[in-house]
Image (cartoon, grey):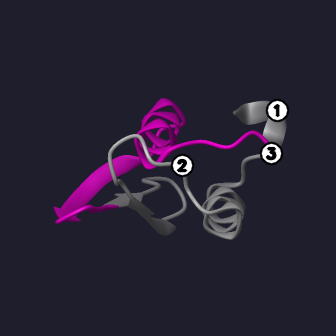
Amino acid sequence: MKHRSGKQMALIARRNGWVLKSQSGSHAKYRDPITGNAVTIPIHGSKMLHPDTQKAIMKVMGLTDDDL
């Protein structure tokens, strides 16, 4: 798996049609306007996401390693 930071995952979310709904501190909440699914992405500067966190985000967003 390619490791990504929260900033990079947020950019990938926007590129895939997810819309930023709100942000509370360092946690950005994105929603898919088609399915209504929601995902929270922790954005801590350029710090890489924990692999399990990244996998969970990718699962909700329906992404694979090839999409990164």
Q: Nearer the viewer, residue 33 or 23?
A: 23
Residue 42 on image: x %, y %: 39, 62
Residues under numbered marks 1 and 3 in contact, where contact means CB atoms less than 8 Å apart: yes
**Quarter residue 66 falls in:** top right
User: Which residue type carries mark 2?
Assistant: Met
- Where residue 41 sits, quadrant-wise, is bottom left
| Separation (CA) of disc 2 from disc 3 | 17 Å
Mark drawn on residue 64? 3
Q: Residue at coordinates 61% horizontally, 63% vertically from top-left?
A: 50
Identify the residue at image location x=17%, y=65%: 25
User: From the viewer's perspective, is the residue at label 1 or at label 2 nearer?
Assistant: 2
Instruction: For mark 1, give the secondary structure.
Output: helix
In screen coordinates, is 22 left or right of 28?
left
* Residue topped by disc 1: 66
Amino acid type, label 1: Asp
Q: Which residues are magenta?
A: 1-28
x then y, percent, for residue 24: 17, 68
Q: Residues within 10 Å of mark 3 (few under 14, many from 20)?
A: few
* SS type, badge 2: loop
Residue marked by disc 2: 48
Q: Amino acid at mark 3?
A: Thr
- Quadrant location of the C terminus in the rendered image: top right
What is the residue that sits farthest to the front in this orientation?
A: 47
Above or below for 61 versus 15: below
Q: Secondary structure at mark 3?
A: loop
State yes or no: residue 20 in magenta: yes
Mark closer to the chain start, 1 or 2: 2
Q: Is residue 8 magenta?
A: yes
Q: Is residue 14 left or right of residue 2?
A: left
Give me the C-alpha separation between circle 1 and circle 3: 5 Å
